[in-house]
Amino acid sequence: MRAWVVRTPGRLERVELPTPAPGPDELLVRVRACGVCRTDLHVRDGDLPPHKSPVVPGHEVVGDVVAAGAAIPDYPVGTRVGVPWLRRTCGVCKYCTRGRENLCPHSLYTGWDADGGYAEYTTVPAAYAYPLPEKDFAEYSDEELAPLLCAGIIGYRALRRADLPPGGRLGVYGFGGSAHLTAQVAIGQGAVVHVLTRSPEAQALARELGAASAAGAYDAPPEPLDSAILFAPVGDLVPVALSALDRGGTLSVAGIYLTDIPPLAYDRQLFQERNLRSVTANTREDGREFLAAAAAYKLRIAVTPYPFDQADQALDDLAADRVNGVAVLVH
């Protein structure tokens, strides 16, 4: 099969690989579309330490089941499924048994610990795949569904971690794939959303999607924020966002990678019970809840499709902020 791999930091290589065989509890999936996530960029550039080398990136996969492992012989071939970032957890540690499997110290991830969706075929443990039935997702194309598998799910968890009160004021820092989905969910729930991002095109998209305001990443929002989510992997924005919070507000940092945070001024950025929270992966329940919400009402998903053979260009464009919305590889 055709595939792209990361073998050395900074380079994505196009290769031919054997089509993988599913393990006993796994599905073999023919890839229809795969979102291009900023985490893939961190894997390519070595910001995340290699867990497997070479590795096929990609963890926002939509595809069809073409075979199932021996332990799941009755899984229907032809089922459309989503292959997400979270690939496997141990199920027995204190975090898994407390419903916090996203913190499992033995967790594995698609496109980092195991080959992902920058290929014609990939595998996924059946218990971690999300069925995407036509009856629930008929209004979405494969290209639109792909970003929901990570950008949407992680954004949903970041929104939950931000403790946004009903009808509250939410600041969104950075406005790429995850942010533009999360903002729509928050607006749909009655929030007032202010977007802070350096891209004029992203600012325009934010206004089109219903944001109350859109300005530069380092600008002050027009009113104090009850909650904020930092999507941009820029540590310098942490004190900026904390300073924009009202008393008792919460900043949720959504990314798996963040540049160093500068010193914080306690009185301006943490005092008056402001909270700073990180987000680590997601649980399968997060995914089920978010996909149910996406099925219930149509999200507008800004997608820039790239032919599969241009995966390297898609990552370069993402790195240079030339992608408005979400880049998606299509076969």
Image (cartoon, helix red, strand yellow):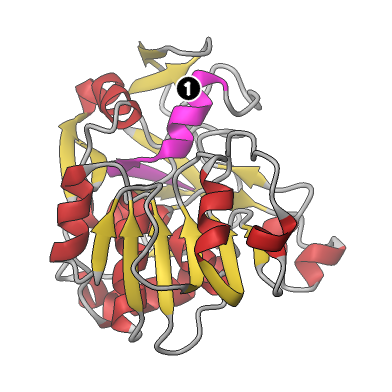
Residue placed furthest toward the front = 267
> Is residue 27 rendered magenta in the image?
yes
Q: Specify the quadrant that holds the C terminus.
A: top left
Residue 196 in picture, x, y percent from top left: 34, 54
What residue is drawn where x is 36% and y is 76%? 186
What residue is drawn where x is 30% and y is 26%? 320
Number of dots carrying numbers: 1
Residue 37 in picture, x, y percent from top left: 39, 40
What residue is drawn where x is 24% and y is 21%? 313
Q: Secondary structure at mark 1?
A: helix
Front residue (pair 89, 9): 9
Vertical placement of residue 245 versus 45, above or below: below
Left/right placement of residue 220 relative to residue 101 reads left
Q: Specify the quadrant that holds the N terminus.
A: top left
User: Can you see residue 230?
Assistant: yes
User: Can you see residue 86?
Assistant: no
What residue is drawn where x is 44% and y is 29%? 41
> Is residue 284 rendered magenta in the image?
no
Vertical placement of residue 247 versus 101, above or below: below
- Amino acid type at circle 1 is Arg
Front residue (pair 64, 327): 327
Vertical placement of residue 65 versus 327, above or below: below
* Picture quadrant where residue 198 is located: top left
Vertical placement of residue 48 versus 9, above or below: below
Left/right placement of residue 84 relative to residue 317 reads right
Residue 295 in picture, x, y percent from top left: 28, 76
**Which residue is tagged 1?**
44
Q: Residues within 10 Å of mark 1 (few under 14, many from 20)?
A: many
Left/right placement of residue 125 relative to residue 191 reads right
Magenta-tinted stretch: 25-46
